[in-house]
Image: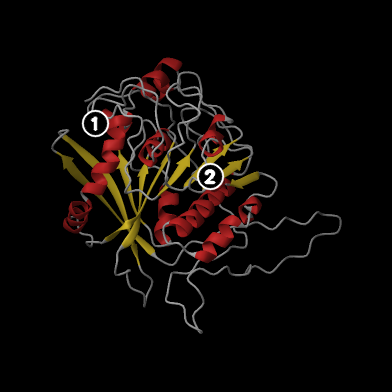
């Protein structure tokens, strides 16, 4: 295994209990050629639930913006590909949209989102989010990186839950994150999409085609740092591992959009104020008011989770669009819409199911806007409707 150098970042595992709600929702319909009888590709639908009369003296429940699941089913396949140069297997979970009855897959292929998990995680991370993207017609590939505790435990290694509850155990987990290898994993996936498609077919699934002009990178925590590096964020470090990645930027310019969930800011030793000055692709940044790193896991604070947005140039300064979805009462482990992390014991003070809905809705509108270039999705994204995803709890900014 290659050395991680000193460019290593914190993250947390998520183990959870689901909660569900059913508010009125906004629907995005699959893209079809516009005709007089066929509205544009994305259309907001009015709330379908009949409003209930409020009991006398009771305040009215605020209307919420919630995006409905799309019309595609999602077929998943777990496959493994081998990187001969690094002599390692890379385990992947591939999600392929299956069009609704009467529809067909796009001739140019599906747009793709590559997902990078947090420290110690695996391809199991954020299943509801990836399923949601798939329902809207996005293929997904979730990577298991070398710091995965599942991989380590197969070898009789890795920290126990008791060890992870200690500062020493958390520091060991953080130190196992090799950002250079993680970036290489993401690029390797793009290099071998045909091989991955063949592996899915051999595993009993169907071969698929990816539109290589519509690729996005997304990740949570250590995966958010991986995402930022792939997007072109510059680092101060002399190296990010030993793969010749010691340049200021290790961007993979095949990615056209980036989703940063609980990312890193200038509290990191290798990120300065100018780290985001050469990013060339749109970025959607997600953070929360209770999202900080515990002892041993890193220096991040709720304020630094905002930095990838705040230090981005934005359109006015000649850069790409940048967006911030910041949720009051959200913790590091709450963005998937699940409950308490086994590592942190942190508890969100905002409904975690609603947090998950806000993340799913915001990121999907972002993808529709910047990968599919859908004008109506752009209008929804830039209208500020995301502020009502959790009334009084969401800050949404763009520049």
The reply, left or right, for residue 384 in relation to residue 78 is: right
- Quick one: SS at disc 2? loop
User: Residue at image x 61%, y 41%?
Assistant: 327
Q: Which residue is situated farthest in the bottom direction here? A: 37
Examine the rendered structure and indicate whether residue 307 appears above or below residue 284.
above
Q: Can residue 147 be seen here?
A: no
Between 355 and 108, the one lying in front of the other is 108
Count of number-bearing discs: 2
Residue 86 in the image, given as x and y percentages of width and height: 17, 33
Quarter of the figure with the N terminus:
top left
- Residue where numbered disc 2 is placed: 314
Quarter of the image for residue 348 reads top right
The reply, left or right, for residue 84 in relation to residue 189 is: left
Q: Which numbered disc flags the more N-terminal residue, 1 or 2?
A: 1
Q: Which residue is situated farthest in the front direction here? A: 318
Front of the two marks 1 and 2? 2
Cα separation between marks 1 and 2: 45 Å
- Residue where numbered disc 1 is placed: 154
Between 143 and 20, the one lying in front of the other is 143
Q: Which residue is situated farthest in the top direction here? A: 168
Quarter of the image for residue 111 reads bottom left
Between 14 and 67, the one lying in front of the other is 67
| Label 1: how many Cα within 10 Å (few below 14, some 14–19, many 20+) | few
| Label 2: how many Cα within 10 Å (few below 14, some 14–19, many 20+) | many
Between 271 and 165, the one lying in front of the other is 271
Residue 157 in the image, given as x and y percentages of width and height: 27, 23
- Quick one: SS at disc 1? helix
């Amino acid at each position: 295994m290659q050395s991680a150098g000193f460019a290593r970042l914190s993250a947390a595992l998520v183990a959870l209990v689901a909660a569900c709600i059913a508010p009125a929702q906004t629907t995005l319909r699959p893209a079809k050629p516009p005709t007089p009888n066929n509205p544009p590709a994305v259309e907001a639908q009015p709330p379908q639930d009949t409003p209930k009369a409020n009991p006398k003296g009771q305040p009215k429940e605020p209307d919420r913006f919630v995006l409905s699941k799309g019309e595609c089913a999602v077929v998943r396949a777990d496959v493994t590909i081998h990187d001969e140069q690094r002599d390692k297997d890379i385990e992947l979970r591939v999600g392929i949209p299956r069009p609704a009855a009467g529809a067909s897959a796009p001739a140019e292929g599906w747009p793709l989102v590559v997902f990078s998990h947090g420290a110690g995680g695996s391809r199991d991370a954020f299943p509801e989010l990836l399923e949601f993207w798939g329902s809207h017609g996005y293929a997904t590939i979730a990577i298991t990186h070398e710091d995965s505790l599942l991989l380590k435990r197969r070898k009789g290694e890795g920290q126990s839950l008791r060890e992870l509850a200690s500062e020493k155990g958390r520091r060991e987990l953080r130190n196992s994150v090799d950002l250079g290898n993680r970036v290489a994993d993401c690029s390797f996936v793009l290099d071998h999409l045909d091989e991955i498609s063949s592996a899915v077919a051999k595993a009993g699934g169907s071969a698929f085609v990816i539109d290589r002009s519509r690729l996005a990178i997304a990740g949570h925590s250590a995966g958010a740092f991986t995402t930022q590096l792939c997007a072109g964020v510059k680092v101060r470090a002399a190296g990010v591992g030993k793969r010749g990645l010691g340049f200021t930027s290790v961007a993979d310019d095949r990615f056209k959009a980036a989703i940063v969930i609980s990312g890193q800011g200038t509290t990191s030793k290798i990120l300065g104020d100018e780290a985001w000055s050469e990013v060339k692709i749109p970025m959607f940044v997600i953070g929360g008011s209770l999202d900080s790193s515990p002892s041993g896991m890193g220096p991040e604070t709720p304020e630094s989770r905002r930095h990838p947005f705040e230090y981005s140039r934005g359109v006015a300064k000649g850069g790409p669009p940048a967006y911030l979805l910041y949720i009051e009462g959200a913790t590091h482990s709450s963005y998937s819409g699940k409950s308490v992390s086994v590592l942190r014991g942190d508890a969100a003070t905002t409904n975690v199911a609603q947090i998950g809905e806000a993340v799913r809705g915001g990121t999907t509108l972002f993808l529709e806007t910047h990968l599919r270039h859908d004008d109506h999705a752009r209008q929804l994204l830039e209208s500020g409707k995301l502020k009502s995803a959790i009334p009084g709890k969401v800050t949404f900014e763009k520049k």
